[in-house]
Image: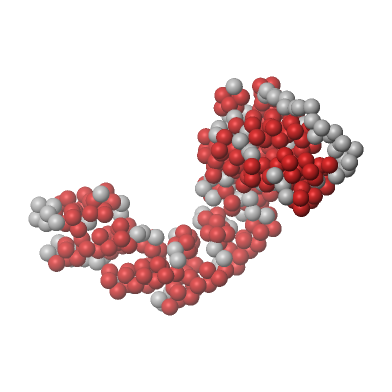
Amino acid sequence: MLHSTIRRHALLPLPQLQRIFFATSTSSHLSGGGTSSRDPHFMVQYLVNSCGFSMEEASKASKPLAHLRSTENPDAVLAFFRSQGIDGPNLRKTISRRPALLCWNVESNLTPKFQFLRDLGLSESDLVDVIMTNPPIVCLNLQHTLLPRLSVWENLFGSRELLLKNLRKRFWLMCNNVENVVRSNLNFLRDECDIPLERASLVFKKYPTFIVQKPDSLRALVDRAEGMGFTRRSPMFLWILDILFKTNREKLDAHSKLMSSFGWSISEFCTAIEKQPCFLNISTDILRIKMEFLIKDIGFTPSAIAKRPRLLVFSLKKRMIPRFQVMKKLKSEGFWTSDDNLHMFFIISDLEFLNKFILPYKDKFPKLLEISGAVAE
């Protein structure tokens, strides 16, 4: 089976991968006798009868088919699509998007391509979903486009398994211009930003949309980051680029204005971004609630939070509030007397917190475990 052959040869050089792929491909020829006509408009009625098009839709879709004088090939194409689970509204949508598909050869154009999709591990429903959400995939050349892109993405992700995991969620990756976009971006990050592929892969494995942005957009993003004071030499520069890519200027300005209202300077705001870029993912409403809790309830100063922005990304309900309740109990009983390294009380792992602040006092304060239930679990 082609599926097992591909898996056995993961990360093969492209020419060898192509030879294996086409050596194991099978084909099926679907064709009927069809009907013929000298009327250049007979395809309009054909589309109405065979696919359920309206006359207006059929008239528009038939224009690329005006040269046809027989339904033999369209019959074969429609029969093939239906055999792959694409029928009814989905079939009409597919043909309306690409009427010229009805001129394609089933055996040489369509069968190998659909076999490629199936042997990537797609079920019938997956395949239909891929075709309907990524219509260009049907028109891409298998040998010169799909297979080279498969090879590039497989090497970028590092394994066939990780590639397939991403393709099931983001099959548009195969429709993206890997040759001119992805390679250009990777070369720019490596050569001009001194970011090696190994580090870049940490971002695009998790957020592939970052690496498929237009090269001019990536350069503009770097200029934007440098304009805020971030340097390409920073080990966090790539993550800063990623968060800025996902954060528009309006949202960034709203976050900056909010933190300024708590006393942060622009320098402190940028320092916090460099240390914990993902805090910009938090909505301003939630961020305001967290800042108020950290300052008014726990007693942190705004500057202390700016130096330790990790405090902002923890869940109030699951971590911060339960641990704060534990702290209050220990303070009231005289077991917490120093606020030095206060941030560590909230930053250490759940296991460390349990062993250091819960278990040593479980006999004296049996309800302490219950208070910290979200942590103890």
Residue occupying image coordinates x 82% and y 32%: 35
Q: Is residue 192 left or right of residue 70?
A: left
Q: In the rendered view, would you say 303 is above or below 177? A: below
Q: In the rendered view, would you say 6 is above or below 152? A: above
Quadrant that contains the N terminus:
top right
Query: Considering depth in this image, is 143 or 87 the residue closer to the camera?
Result: 87
Question: Does the image show residue 182?
Answer: yes
Coloring scheme used: secondary structure
Q: Is residue 267 left or right of residue 2?
A: left
Query: Considering depth in this image, is 163 or 126 the residue closer to the camera?
Result: 126
Query: Considering depth in this image, is 92 or 210 the residue closer to the camera?
Result: 92
Residue 345 spot, x, y in % from top left: 27, 59
Residue 250 spot, x, y in % from top left: 55, 71
Q: Disc count in the image?
A: 0
Residue occupying image coordinates x 62% and y 60%: 222
Furthest-right residue in view? Answer: 38
**Image-quadrant location for residue 5:** top right
Residue 116 spot, x, y in % from top left: 64, 31
Furthest-left residue in view? Answer: 364
Residue occupying image coordinates x 38% and y 63%: 312
Residue 150 spot, x, y in % from top left: 64, 36
**Image-quadrant location for residue 112:** top right
Residue occupying image coordinates x 80% and y 50%: 59
Q: Is residue 25 left or right of residue 231?
A: right
Question: Does the image show residue 142?
Answer: no
Q: In the rendered view, would you say 148 is above or below 234? A: above
